[in-house]
Image: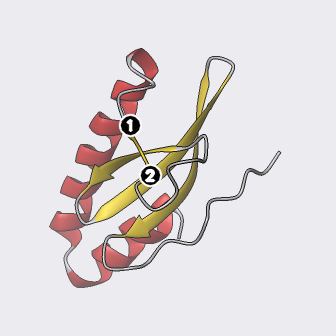
Amino acid sequence: MHFLDAIAYIFRDNPSAAVKFREKAEKVLSRLKTYPESGRHIPEFPDLPFREVIVRPYRFFYKIKNDTVWVIAVWHSSQLPEEPQEHG
């Protein structure tokens, strides 16, 4: 799932919750500009070079490449994540 898909999904049931989720996610993700290693390693895949931050109920998986943080997947916390794949 992508970030915009998560917002659209929430919006269908509760537009104001979607706005709050987007604002919270943007705040958490923007923190990665200053503290890119603040997310934890993904517990299900500890040997992979990816990290995650949680904006309930979603998990954002990301990688750090050079000085850029790339969000590579967004999973609802009730889903069992598949192994993240590095694209590009």
Q: Are marks 2 and 1 in contact (CB under 8 Å)?
A: no
User: Residue type at mark 2?
Assistant: Ile
Residue at the image position 22 percent from the left and 60 percent from the top: 56
- The tally of labels here is 2
Crowd rating for badge 1 (residues with CA inside 10 Å; few <14, some 14–19, many 20+):
many
Query: Dot 1 corresponds to which residue?
Result: 29
The quarter of the rendered structure image containing the C terminus is top right
Check the image and name the residue furthest to the bottom.
Answer: 13
Crowd rating for badge 2 (residues with CA inside 10 Å; few <14, some 14–19, many 20+):
many
Q: Is residue 88 left or right of residue 3?
A: right
Q: Is residue 6 left or right of residue 86?
A: left
Mark number displayed over residue 44 = none
Q: Is residue 17 left or right of residue 40?
A: left
Asked whether 81 or 15 is in front, the reply is 81
Residue at the image position 49 percent from the left and 51 percent from the top: 61
Spatial CA span between label 2 and label 1: 16 Å
Question: What is the x, y in percent for residue 62?
Answer: 53, 44
Question: What is the x, y in percent for residue 53?
Answer: 35, 45
Asked whether 37 or 24 is in front, the reply is 37
Residue at the image position 49 percent from the left and 71 percent from the top: 81
Query: Dot 2 corresponds to which residue?
Result: 42
On screen, residue 85 above or below 51: below
Question: What is the x, y in percent for residue 73?
Answer: 55, 59
